[in-house]
Image (cartoon, coloured by chain):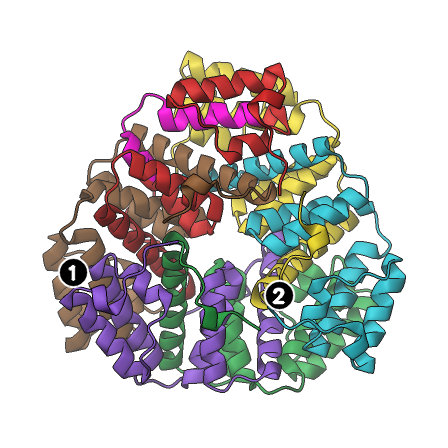
Chain colours: A green, B purple, C red, D brown, E cyan, F yellow
């Protein structure tokens, strides 16, 4: 198994990030993603700051919508870990079975039409060009 | 340029779909995607039915959220046509510059953490396993 | 524009590959792909040997089917150059508009169901496991 | 494990699709993909209609070629479920070990040359531009 | 064209980042990537901090190797902007034509073998499992 | 499990390649990748020649850098087998924990900025256009 850094074995620098994850998420649980990337503390710190800012910071998109977007990207890329963890996070924020069904139907449809647009070599309409 | 089927040159089968696109979207404009895939009428009909159902049908996700998800997938895949057309559609449904900024920040972050999860070969936490 | 090596400016090593491309394809035309990768002769030689073997060598799949597969991969990846050049090659080998329509409909559908399988985290049926 | 809807526990709407899958494929076996997406009946119905049309409907491409294309896309995307299930389907339609070898050699080669075309930023030849 | 924020029109917050880009890279030139993402200042700030840390911060990998890795990812993803900008950056740090040729040959080969490993559904050797 | 061809059961043609793998790598161990693709001897031979040339042949990039590039591509594509085997190969050639951390941080960052460049539809700066 991949090396996972547990809180009790962590350096002060890593513990500091783990503490902020716990405080931000209001849970003692640190999931494997953070324990694994803690083998390289600068990556742990930067990645957490980034994830915290875009997922838990102020903004116009509500927290559930942010998680739906995260699942959409992860399902497109086929990242098993990310699909599992962010589906769980989305459910914790209120995603119903129906919402998941709609989300994945959109993700599937977009992946289909993306390839139709590629394969037919379709030129962008003038009105869609940014100006 | 790719062959585009204009309404006036279209077969009755194709016109029938074009008419439904116009009625559903309440605009006379048919964008290049539909004109291009109209060279294969079964693909035109099936794709439109699919897109209409997931994007304009009843459901729990509101229309703007559906477009944000579409843009997220298209930006992940790098489909230029789809990014341009669905960004325009999202703006028409109320997406602000701030929302686009937040959306792409999440898309970028998810694409980053997807690869960290891959590269570190991180095992899925038991609590994230579906049951 | 990217540097393209023309036949008249090519080294003997590059000309040797260009000559084999011409003889194999029975045309004087060398397309930009080969002229561009000729800046690194070992890549030119290896890539041509590989493409020649899998696309023009003996085998059970007929030449048109091989080109359809090439287009399917290129449309999935969104490689504009490869979509354009291999669609042209497929047409030269007999691909009709109808075949292209069917091909891209399958490519789109597979890209859709690939993401549904990812997103729903579906376990492989025992009977599909290789043994 | 992901929730799978068994036939005996299915709603009439879902059973109706399952019945059509059985009749079309002439087998009682419903594979996990359909049982999993049955949690969202509209996705089940639409996806089956799409897959049935492109894989089992009339057309110029024979059934084995359609499956080879499906495997090519799935191998490119790295979708484990889809690779396993469509490789099994292709074998059932007559794919030999030799054909699989040739197929994957083409898929690998196309994935290689797609990246060479990207990396060298190669312009599309005028003669490959659609007109 | 996409909206680009020029230095003279930028808010103090954006100018602050632009100033750091100029100081870090020792050039007055701000490339379009930064001007474009400046429409969402938090994304500009976070992205620059991330890029600066991983590309210009202390570490064991030398600057040229870091750029080669960036080009490898961008060519794999087919991101035209990133391929062009990071190829230029790599050349500025000493990449020769030969190095680019070797780099893209490795990228192409890895993309090929990735799909062979997928398609043949190859189990990971025990000795490669992390422990 | 996937069919793996062991040395003792291999045809002379396959043994010949296995012998060269052993001699080149100075180890008796043949990993599963080669045993699996040996079911199609032409693919085995071509793929080994390609991998041997780009990874073990003469060139300007040192062997460790070549492996880092291979891992970067594999992590981007999410190929589990390739990530595991090439991470092991990179460690055997001297990759430290710190180097792996830096590598994956760059891979993650490049995957992020690739999508920002896509999503913002950023035009390539004139100075980055190849000429």
Q: Would you name the residue on which mark 1 appears?
A: D21
- Alpha carbons under labels 2 and 1: distance apart: 42 Å
Q: Secondary structure at mark 2?
A: helix
Q: Main SS type for the magenta part?
A: helix
- Queried whether the magenta region covers residue B114, the answer comes back as no
Location of residue E57 with respect to E97 vertically, above or below:
below
The chain holding disc 2 is: F
Residue B8 in the image, given as x and y percentages of width and height: 22, 68
- Queried whether the magenta region covers residue C49, the answer comes back as yes
Question: Residue at image x 45%, y 38%?
Answer: D110
The chain holding disc 1 is: D
Quadrant of the drawing holding the C terminus of chain B: bottom left
- Disc 2 crowd, CA 10 A, few/some/many (<14, 14-19, 20+): many
Residue C89 in the image, given as x and y percentages of width and height: 35, 36
Question: Residue at image x 26%, y 61%?
Answer: B38
Q: Nearer the viewer, mark 2 or mark 1?
A: 2
- Disc 1 crowd, CA 10 A, few/some/many (<14, 14-19, 20+): many
Residue F78 or E127: which is nearer the viewer?
Answer: F78
The single residue placed furthest to the top in the displayed view is F12
Quarter residue B3 falls in: bottom left
Residue A33 in the image, given as x and y percentages of width and height: 63, 64
Task: Report how many numbered discs are placed on residues in the image.
Answer: 2
The single residue placed furthest to the front in the displayed view is B8
Quarter residue A40 falls in: bottom right
Residue F7 or D54: which is nearer the viewer?
Answer: D54
Q: Would you name the residue on which mark 2 appears?
A: F116
- Asked whether the viewer can see residue B117, the reply is yes
Q: Over which residues does the magenta segment extend?
A: C44-67
Question: Residue at image x 58%, y 82%?
Answer: B99
Report whether E35 appears left or right of F9: right
């Amino acid at each position: 198994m991949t090396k996972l850094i547990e809180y009790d074995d962590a350096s002060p620098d890593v513990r500091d990030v783990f503490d902020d994850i716990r405080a931000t998420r209001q849970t003692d649980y640190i999931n494997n993603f953070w324990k694994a990337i803690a083998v390289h503390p600068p990556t742990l710190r930067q990645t957490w700051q980034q994830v915290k800012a875009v997922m838990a910071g102020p903004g116009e998109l509500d927290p559930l919508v942010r998680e739906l977007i995260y699942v959409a990207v992860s399902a497109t890329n086929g990242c098993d870990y990310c699909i599992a963890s962010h589906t769980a996070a989305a459910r914790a924020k209120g995603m119903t079975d129906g919402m998941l069904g709609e989300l994945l139907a959109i993700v599937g449809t977009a992946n289909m039409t993306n390839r139709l647009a590629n394969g037919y070599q379709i030129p962008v309409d003038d009105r869609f060009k940014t100006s």
